Image: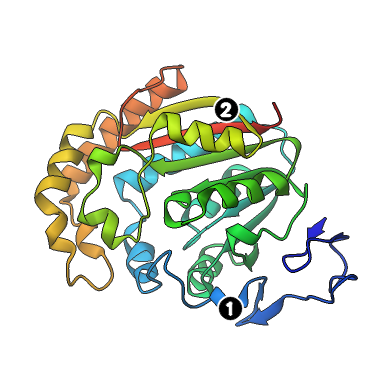
Amino acid sequence: MILCPTCQATYEIIAESCPQCGFAPEVLEGFLCWAPEVAYCNDGFDPEAFAGLAKNEEGHFWFEARNRLIVWALQTYFPRMSSYLEGGCGTGFVLRGVTEAFPEVDLHGSEIFVDGLKFAKERHPSGHLMQIDACRMPFHEQFDVIGAFDVLEHIEADDEALRGICAATKPGGGVILTVPQHDWLWSGVDEFACHKRRYSREGLHKLLEGAGLRVLRSTSFVSLLLPAMLASRLLGGQQLKGDADGSSEFNLSPLLNSLFSRVLDFEGRLIRAGLNFPLGGSRLVVAVKGR
């Protein structure tokens, strides 16, 4: 079902416009846009950074490890899902990985920036991509699972976004999130990335519960590399100033990238075996709709 972002009426997804108020999404650069007024400019992210992300995600230890963890979580907790939406899909790197793992699932990707959707379209040319403001989610009980990976920290009203995500999930359906963790890791990297906050386990769980979601699994990751991450944040955050596309954050030697990849691969095996890390640069949460 569609949830009209203007009047909150619900109607069948095949309708071209809201039967109550007449609202209809616009089409911009080939993408259906449910919030066109913020499709090119808002304070959640710098759209110029998409080019740097698209160039550097491939092969980078952190992005590859996060993808493996996300796909494993989907396969483990929601193996029978038939519909999936990724909110804030960015350049489509995660969405492509999910598509490869679930070729039979009805997959959708949304992003607030049309500029991000252009890159996602290159990686996922046959996918259903649309422009959406997460705080005005235009769906009601539409998807089996919704994922949002390093998205909430860019949204001022993260509680509102989570309520919208919950409303768009079918009863008993699932939500998977990753977020940056620990206030004491805050640095210039977060400021450059337009983060509003880093999360604590307790604060994130409280937000999820307030939105109507029940936590099934919660663990830190990038835990074994936490000392290296902390040192990097303390020593290297200033290097991002004047970096137009954020590429300096990804400047690792092939040897170091390979080493970190092996460490996170080992960490991932521990998580898959049931270990929940208390500390880490990021947190993964798997939740379901309902108490």
Alpha-carbon distance for marks 1 and 2? Answer: 34 Å
Mark 1: few/some/many CA within 10 Å (<14, 14-19, 20+): few
Q: Which residue is mark 1?
A: 37
Q: Residue at x 66, y 36 (%)?
A: 212
Rendered location of residue 37, percent (x, y)? 58, 78
Report whether 66 appears left or right of 137. left
Rendered location of residue 28, percent (x, y)? 62, 82
Q: Extreme left residue here?
A: 235
Q: Is residue 74 visible?
A: no
Residue type (three-letter) at the residue carrying disc 1? Glu
Quadrant of the frame with the N terminus? bottom right
Task: Please tell me which residue lies in front, 160 or 217.
Answer: 160
Q: Residue at x 64, y 67 (%)?
A: 130
Query: Which quadrant of the figure has residue 27?
Result: bottom right
Rendered location of residue 68, percent (x, y)? 45, 38
Q: Extreme top residue here?
A: 274
Residue type (three-letter) at the residue carrying disc 2? Val
Q: Residue at x 50, y 78 (%)?
A: 40
Callout 2: helix, strand or loop?
strand
The mark nearer the N terminus, 1 or 2, is 1
Task: Please tell me which residue lies in front, 262 or 90.
Answer: 90
Callout 1: helix, strand or loop?
helix
Rendered location of residue 229, percent (x, y)? 20, 40
Query: Which quadrant of the figure has residue 173?
Result: top right
Quadrant of the frame with the C terminus? top right
Q: Which residue is mark 2?
A: 215
The answer to the question of whether label 1 and label 2 lie on touching residues, with beta carbons closer than 8 A, is: no
